[in-house]
Amino acid sequence: MKLYSYFRSSAAYRVRIALNLKELEHDIVPVNLLKSEQRGEPYLSKNPQGLLPAIETEQGVLSQSLAILEWLDEIAPQAPLVSGDAWEKAQIRALAYAIAVDIHPINNLRVLKYLTAELNVSDEQKTKWYQDWIVTGFDSLESQLGEGPFCFGSAPTLADICLVPQVFNALRFKVDMDRYPKIMAVYEHCNTLKAFADAAPQQQVDAT
């Protein structure tokens, strides 16, 4: 398998974690978002949507991180990302979607670029935008978490896979994380695992 990835892409980060947890062999193919390589013909021929990540398999190319994660869970049931009874599975998905669907899309790179390039928003205002949406989302998430060590139970799930990249970005944009002790406890515990540590942005071949 080939994973088309950018080191700071939250969505690609999720998939890198899952591939590591499931110990699936794969190659990383860097696509530089800052240089708009995702809009070039070589990548668009793989993923017409022009977004990261995408995963190339013998069956073809699959895009959208949540779809990729669900597919990985079906083809490689080891280290399941969603487990338990129907209610427990729904709880895991609900927290993961709160991050991947509600927080991340309005703070991703193409939105931030639009704010600065098209709306002439200052860097300070852009940062404020980012921080406000993180705080809105994390205030709710913090109240939903238990005592850990993961978001749910004693093993990492889809929720942790979505949470860790979002916390990484929150720290990068200087969100005050002291107000989220439960979230930070999960983040720090996850990063003690090799699967998470090896997927971190600073460990990627295209890290700058």
Image (cartoon, helix red, strand yellow):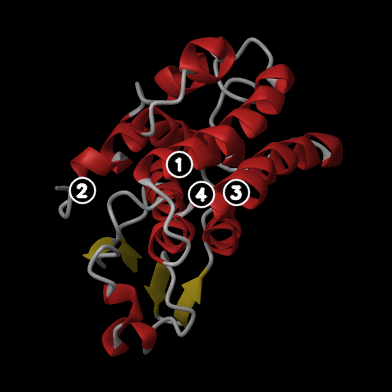
Return the disc, 4 or 2, that comes first in the chain's sequence. Answer: 4
Specify the amino acid type for callout 2: Gln
Dot 2: what SS? loop
Q: Label 3 amino acid?
A: Ala
As drawn, 49 above or below 175: below
- Amino acid type of the residue that numbered disc 4 sits on in the rendered structure: Asn
Tags 2 and 3 touching, CB below 8 Å = no
Rendered location of residue 65, percent (x, y): 52, 59
Disc 3 residue crowd, few under 14, some 14–19, many 20+, Cα 10 Å: many
Label 1 neighbour load within 10 Å: few <14, some 14-19, many 20+: few
Find disc 2 in the rendering and name its residue.
204
Front position among marks 2 and 1: 1
Q: According to the image, label 4 marks what residue?
A: 107
Q: Nearer the viewer, mark 2 or mark 3?
A: 3
**Residue 11 at what x, y percent from top left?**
46, 54
First of labels 1, 3 by sequence position: 3
| Residue found 40% across the figure and 57% down from its top | 116
Q: Residue at x 27, y 38 (%)?
A: 198
Between the C-alphas of marks 4 and 2, the distance is 22 Å
Q: Work out whether residue 127 or residue 83 is closer to the camera in this orientation and state it.
A: 127
Please name which of the two marks, 1 or 3, marks the residue nearer to the observer: 1
Dot 4 or dot 3: first in sequence order is 3
In this picture, residue 37 sits left or right of residue 76: left
Which residue in the structure is indicated by mark 3? 100
Give how far across and how far down residue 21 sits, in percent: 42, 41
Determine whether the residue tagged by mark 1 lies in a helix, strand or loop: helix
Q: Which mark is residue 125?
A: 1
- Could you tell me which secondary element the residue under label 3 belongs to? helix
